[in-house]
C-alpha cells in the first residue's frame, strides 16, 4: 500500500442503518476512493447523540437488522481492503437496532455478586454472537468508567458501579466473553469519564484530579485491562488539566495523556480509538477541515471514529506525520483485522440471533441482581391483608396488566389501579379510590435511564408517592435506574423497597416470583444512595 492508502485505514466514518440511497452511495465512494479502514454503525441520523438542536423525530424500522446485514455485505463488496465493521452495542444490538436481543445495562450487571460474574462473561459472548450474525467484528464497549458522580448526565447506568475492583473485573469478563466469540472489544473512556457532570456530546467535561488520584481510582480498570492484553482503548473527550500542563485540552487531542501516560507510563501498545469526532466537545474547535483529524492522530489515536472529513484528514496526516508513526498505527489496525479473521477467505457467517438464549440469560441475571434496599414486613402479613381485601396494586407508567402486577393480582386477587400517563389522570381521584386500603404494592417503571429532568418522572407522580408513603403501608418495586430512588420523597417510610433495575419481562416475572415465594435476594446495590 502507498502511505496514503495506509492512512485511509485510520478512518472509521459513521454510517446509518436507515439512511438514504444517496448517503449510502456517498459512503461507497469513500470506501472505493480512500481505502478507509472501517465503519461505525448507528441507527439513523436522527438518533445520533449530537442531534439535540434539530430534535428530529426517530423513525423506527422493524427491518433494521436485515437492512444492517445487507448494507455490510454491500459495503464490503466496495472495499479493496476488508472493512472492520464496528458498533457501540453496550447492552446488545438492541442499543442500535430494533427487534434484536437486549441484555441488561451495566449498572444491572454491577448488582450481581462477585461469584456470579460468569454471567457478565456470558453477556459479552452472546452480544458478540449477535454482532457476528450481522457481520460486525468490533464492539465499542464496555465502559471502564467508575460511577463516582451521581449527577453524571451521560455515564450512570452504563457503568458497572462505583467499586473500582468490581468495575475492572466485570469489564474484563465482558471483554473475555466477546474475545472468546471472536469479536474485538474496547475499554472506554480513558482516563475515566465517571466523575464528570458535563455531557461530552455537548460540551467538554473537566476532571480536577491529579495523577496520583487518577492512578488510585479512575485509571485502575484501564491498568488491569492493559495487564490482561485488551484489544483497544477509547479516549474520552474530557480535559484533565493536571495531566496537560494546566490546559483544558480534551484527552482525545492530548499527547501528554495518550502518548506519555497511556503509551509510555502505563505501557500500552494496543489499538487506541478516539471517541466520536463529531461530538461537540471537539468538533467545533477547528475551522479548517481535516485539522481535527490530524490533531487527534498526532495526539496518539490510531483510529479516528466518526471522522467527518475523510479526504482532508488523510491529506493533513500525509503532509504532517512521519512514515514511522503512520506505520505504527497501520500495524495495530492490521493486527486487529487479522485477529477477527477478516483476511480468511471462504469463511461463512453461520451465526443467527438467539432470542431464547438471551431470555434465559436475562432470567439468570434477574435472579441474582434484583436488590433488597429495605424490608420490614413478612409474607404472612401480606397474605392476611389480601384475604381481608385490604391490599391494592398501583402501577406507574405501565398498565396493571404488566407481568409483575398480573402475576401478583392472579395470586392475591388485589384491587388494581394504574397511571400510564399524567395528562389524563385525576390524582385526587386515585388517592380517594385507594383510601380504604391499608397496604399498597406500588410498581414504579422509571420512564428514562438518564437522569435528565429527574428521569422524566412527573412532579405529580412524585407528589402522589410522597402522600401515599406517608399515609399507607407501602411496598415499592422500582424498575429502572437506582439513582432514581433518592428522588422519591418519604421512600424510607416504605415497608419494603426493592430495586429491580430493568423492566424486561424476565425481570418483572422474577420480581413477582420473589414476592410471592418470599425468596432470598442476592443483588448488591452497585452505587451508594441515600433515600429520603
Image: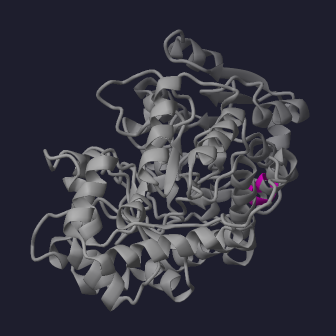
**Prevailing secondary structure of the magenta residues:** helix
Residue at image location 41% in from the left, 43% down from the top = 451
User: Residue 410 falls in which quadrant of the image?
Assistant: top right
Q: At 64% across and 68% down in the image, what residue appears?
A: 174
Task: Determine whether, in the image, residue 57 is placed left or right of residue 253.
Answer: right
The reply, left or right, for residue 219 in relation to residue 359 is: left
Q: Is residue 494 left or right of residue 293?
A: right
Q: Position of residue 448 (x, y in %)?
A: 50, 37
Q: Is residue 89 magenta?
A: no
Q: Nearer the viewer, residue 493 or 34?
A: 34
* Quadrant including the N terminus: bottom left
The magenta region covers 362-366
Residue 58 pos. (x, y %): 50, 24
User: Who is closer to the viewer here, 352 or 365?
Assistant: 352
Viewer can see residue 396: yes
Give the residue drawn at x 58%, y 51%: 89
Q: Give the quadrant of residue 386.
A: top right
Q: Is residue 261 above or below residue 407?
A: below
Residue 415 position, x and y percent, is 77, 23
Amino acid at each position: 500500500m502507498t502511505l496514503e492508502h495506509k492512512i485511509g485505514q485510520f478512518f472509521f466514518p459513521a454510517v446509518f442503518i436507515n439512511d438514504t440511497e444517496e448517503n449510502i452511495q456517498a459512503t461507497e465512494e469513500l470506501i472505493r476512493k480512500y481505502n478507509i479502514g472501517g465503519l461505525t454503525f448507528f441507527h439513523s441520523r436522527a438518533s445520533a447523540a449530537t442531534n439535540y438542536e434539530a430534535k428530529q423525530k426517530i423513525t423506527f424500522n422493524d427491518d433494521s437488522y436485515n437492512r444492517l446485514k445487507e448494507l455490510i455485505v454491500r459495503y464490503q463488496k466496495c472495499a479493496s481492503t476488508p472493512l472492520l465493521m464496528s458498533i457501540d452495542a453496550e447492552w446488545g444490538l438492541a442499543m442500535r437496532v430494533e427487534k434484536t436481543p437486549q441484555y441488561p445495562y451495566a449498572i444491572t450487571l454491577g448488582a450481581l455478586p462477585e461469584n456470579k460474574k460468569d454471567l457478565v462473561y456470558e453477556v459479552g459472548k452472546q452480544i458478540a454472537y449477535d454482532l457476528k450474525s450481522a457481520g460486525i467484528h468490533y464492539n465499542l464497549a464496555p465502559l471502564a468508567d467508575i460511577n463516582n458522580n451521581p449527577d453524571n448526565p451521560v455515564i450512570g447506568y452504563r457503568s458497572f458501579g462505583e467499586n473500582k475492583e468490581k468495575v475492572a473485573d466485570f469489564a474484563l469478563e465482558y471483554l473475555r466473553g466477546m474475545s472468546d466469540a471472536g469479536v474485538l472489544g474496547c475499554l472506554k473512556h480513558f482516563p475515566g469519564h465517571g466523575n464528570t457532570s458535563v455531557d461530552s456530546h455537548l460540551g467538554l467535561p473537566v476532571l480536577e484530579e491529579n495523577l496520583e488520584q487518577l492512578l488510585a481510582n479512575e485509571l485502575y480498570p484501564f491498568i488491569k485491562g492493559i495487564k490482561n492484553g485488551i484489544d483497544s482503548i477509547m479516549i474520552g473527550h474530557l480535559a484533565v488539566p493536571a495531566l496537560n500542563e494546566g490546559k483544558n485540552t480534551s484527552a482525545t487531542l492530548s499527547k501528554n495523556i495518550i502518548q506519555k501516560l497511556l503509551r509510555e507510563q502505563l505501557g500500552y501498545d494496543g489499538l487506541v480509538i478516539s471517541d466520536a469526532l463529531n461530538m461537540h466537545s471537539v468538533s467545533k474547535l477547528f475551522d479548517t477541515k481535516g485539522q481535527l483529524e490530524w490533531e487527534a492522530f498526532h495526539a496518539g489515536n490510531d483510529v479516528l471514529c466518526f471522522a467527518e472529513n475523510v479526504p482532508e484528514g488523510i491529506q493533513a496526516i500525509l503532509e504532517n506525520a512521519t512514515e514511522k508513526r503512520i506505520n505504527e498505527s497501520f500495524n495495530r489496525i492490521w493486527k486487529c483485522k487479522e485477529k477477527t479473521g477478516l483476511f480468511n477467505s471462504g469463511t461463512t457467517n453461520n451465526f443467527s440471533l438467539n432470542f431464547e438464549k438471551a431470555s434465559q440469560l436475562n432470567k439468570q441475571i434477574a435472579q441474582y441482581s434484583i436488590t433488597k434496599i429495605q424490608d420490614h414486613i413478612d409474607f404472612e402479613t401480606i397474605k392476611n391483608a389480601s384475604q381481608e381485601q385490604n391490599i391494592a396494586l398501583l402501577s406507574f407508567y405501565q398498565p396493571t396488566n404488566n407481568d409483575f402486577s398480573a402475576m401478583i393480582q392472579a395470586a392475591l386477587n388485589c384491587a388494581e389501579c394504574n397511571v400510564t400517563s399524567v395528562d389524563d389522570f385525576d390524582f385526587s381521584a386515585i388517592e380517594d379510590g385507594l383510601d380504604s386500603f391499608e397496604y399498597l404494592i406500588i410498581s414504579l417503571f422509571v420512564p428514562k435511564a438518564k437522569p435528565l429532568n429527574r428521569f422524566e418522572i412527573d412532579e405529580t407522580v412524585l407528589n402522589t408517592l410522597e402522600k401515599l408513603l406517608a399515609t399507607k403501608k407501602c411496598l415499592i418495586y422500582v424498575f429502572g435506574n437506582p439513582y432514581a430512588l433518592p428522588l422519591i420523597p418519604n421512600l424510607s417510610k416504605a415497608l419494603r423497597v426493592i430495586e429491580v433495575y430493568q423492566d424486561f419481562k424476565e425481570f418483572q416475572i422474577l420480581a413477582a416470583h420473589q414476592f410471592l415465594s418470599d425468596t432470598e435476594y442476592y443483588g448488591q446495590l452497585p452505587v451508594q444512595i441515600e433515600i429520603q
